[in-house]
Image (spheres, helix red, strand yellow):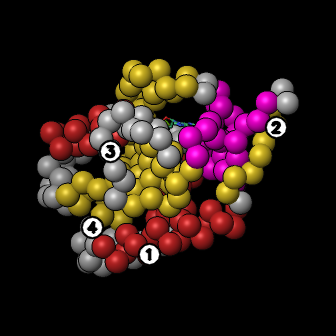
Amino acid sequence: MSELKVLISKNELYKKIQDTADKINAFYGSEDVLNLVCVLKGAAMFACELMKYLDMPVKIEFVSLASYDATKSTGVLQTKHLDLPDFNNENVLIVEDIIDSGLTMDFLIRYIETHCSAKSIKLAVLLEKECEHKYDIKPDFCASKIDDKFIVGFGLDYNGIYRNLDYIASLESL
Ligand code: IMP
Ligand code: MG
């Protein structure tokens, strides 16, 4: 049995996402198209909330990647859906839920660099785990840092559940 312990409340989380959107708006011009690449399933809620506050013309694509099994990284990336267009020299902002080892983002950044003709590729994450990332990945925009423990909520799951929580929680064993 496990219980949920709130780590970032709903109000805190929404404020952090708005602050992140402000930084993204300040970084890009308000005229240039910004292509979001949302990494399913975990980043769905973050991307939907974040894009509401963006000022520039925004487009969105979805990819589906998985590296976790229950509470641990498998170290192997599964590409479940990866069908991105040519971005025709427009800016790309990857929107991801959390960075742990950095494996998922290391793969996706390289993939977009190689296949998609992006003008620039930046990374926005909801959470960055405070651990040594095995891959050298640094987010350009990060809503919040978090202790190195397994967490759920706001898109993040444990065996497929808890994605619908509107806050971030750790799973504590009873
Ligand atoms: P990485 O590839 O090791 O950086 O792990 C990132 C991916 O693993 C994210 O896209 C998440 O889907 C998943 N993940 C990492 N940490 C957690 C967690 O604490 N809870 C739920 N999913 C996680
Ligand atoms: Mg993921």
Kindly report the distance in space between the C-alpha atoms of the residues bearing marks 2 and 4: 43 Å
Label 2 vs label 4, nearer the camera: 2
Q: Position of residue 150 (x, y in %)?
A: 62, 36
In reply to whether residue 162 is colored magenta, the answer given is yes
Mark 2 closeness class: few <14, some 14–19, many ≥20 residues within 10 Å:
few
Q: Nearer the viewer, residue 138 or 14?
A: 138
Q: How many marks?
A: 4
Label 1 vs label 3, nearer the camera: 3
What number is the disc on residue 137?
Answer: 3
- The image quadrant where one finds the N terminus is top right
Residue kind at label 1, given as amino acid type: Asp
Q: Is residue 148 left or right of residue 59?
A: right
Q: Which residue is mark 1?
A: 22
Q: Is residue 70 left or right of residue 129?
A: right
The kind of secondary structure element at disc 1 is helix
The kind of secondary structure element at disc 2 is strand
Residue 149 falls in image quadrant: top right
Comes first in the chain, label 2 or label 3: 2
Disc 3 Cβ-to-ligand 1 distance below 8 Å = yes
The kind of secondary structure element at disc 3 is loop
Comes first in the chain, label 1 or label 3: 1
Q: Which residues are magenta?
A: 147-173
Disc 2 Cβ-to-ligand 1 distance below 8 Å = no
Residue 133 falls in image quadrant: top left
Kindly report the distance in space between the C-alpha atoms of the residues bearing marks 4 and 1: 16 Å
Q: Which residue is mark 4?
A: 33
Q: Nearer the viewer, residue 166 or 9?
A: 9
> Image height check: is 152 above or below 11?
above
Residue kind at label 3, given as amino acid type: Ile
Residue at image x 22%, y 39%? 110
Q: Position of residue 165 (x, y in %)?
A: 71, 49
What number is the disc on residue 3?
Answer: 2
